[in-house]
Image: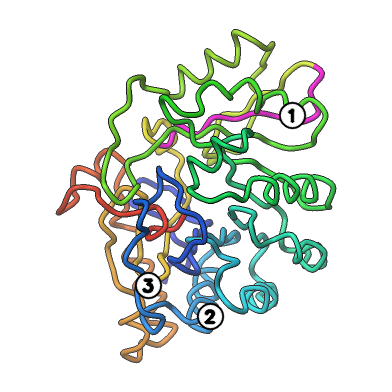
Amino acid sequence: MINSLIDSFGRQIDYVRLAVTDRCNLRCNYCMPAHGIDIVPRKELLTFKEMYRIVRVLTELGVQKVRLTGGEPFVRKDFMFFLEMLSSNDLLETINITTNGALIAKHISDLEKLPKIKTINLSIDSLQKEKFADITRRDVFDDIYRTLELLEKSSLQLKLNVVIQSGSNCDEIIDFVKLTKNKNIAVRFIEEMPFNGEGLREGNENWNFSKILNEITKNFNAVEISSERSSTSRNYQINNHLGTVGIIPAFTRAICSDCNRIRITAIGTFKNCLFDDGVFNLKDFIRNGASNNDLKELFLSLVKQKPENGFIAEANRKKHISESMSTIGG
């Protein structure tokens, strides 16, 4: 029996993005409507034990890296306990976390003690207090910027995720790049996607990969640096800067050919691609008594359905995109 997750295009899947909750304490306008989303009852969420089991089976099939997302992962009670639990998996090499930074500060020293936790991705879309409040619909900028500085001084690698929105924060690209001058951080600009709970937002300008890169190179001497083959970002070093900048072509999808990842939502929906509908309900499968071998066979068959790219995944959807990024998982 084949014991590694290889899709029908020969791509080896070794990375899972796991959402631990659909709840979030911010209301970012590119992620969800102002009133929030209809959160699911707690019993509908995967338990930590179920999540541990899913990851364990995946690591036995060659997955080495997990990224924990939400919603906001630190909103979920006992999330630190789950991190310790997950760290005990001897087959897992790397645990990374995506967070909005509002609740992580008090946990930084404990996170540093867990050697498998390598990188924190901090979502921050403006360096201006008022604009930050407009985007997130919450007045927490000062706390989050303090957290940024604490994380930068910690032993954890820090990446900043910045979603570039037409008519909102595109004038701050240069300010974010300047942050990398004296801070050992990776700033990654992300194309806006239609996962805001309402579908694609109308924008006056298309701030795609090329336009963002052009804005950077007009102002800085940026040289592309080599990245892992399956990297979601194209990365650049700026002359005399301590940190780096990257651009994630999330919507134009120029990164699909080397995709090595799958997604599992907080309610246990298995997704081969960010843009698909979700291909299987793992939670019901587990709660109906599936064994670990059943799970292995299921995963091996599901990855064979992985589409070649995100455009094909979107074309195959049964309904138009209307989910929130908080529901899908970061």
- The x, y position of residue 86, in whole percent, is 63, 74
What element does badge 3 sit on? Answer: loop
Label 3 crowd (10 A; few <14 / some 14-19 / many >=20)? many
The residue pinned by badge 3 equals 267
What element does badge 1 sit on? Answer: loop
What element does badge 2 sit on? Answer: helix
Q: Is residue 63 above or below residue 53?
A: above
Mark carried by residue 50: none
The residue pinned by badge 2 equals 48
Magenta stretch encompasses residue 55: no
Q: Quadrant of residue 251?
A: top left
Q: Is residue 51 left or right of residue 203?
A: right
Task: Kindly report the distance in space between the C-alpha atoms of the residues bearing marks 1 and 3.
Answer: 37 Å
The residue pinned by badge 1 equals 180
Residue ID at (49%, 64%): 18
Q: Which residues are magenta?
A: 240-250
Residue ID at (54%, 21%): 171
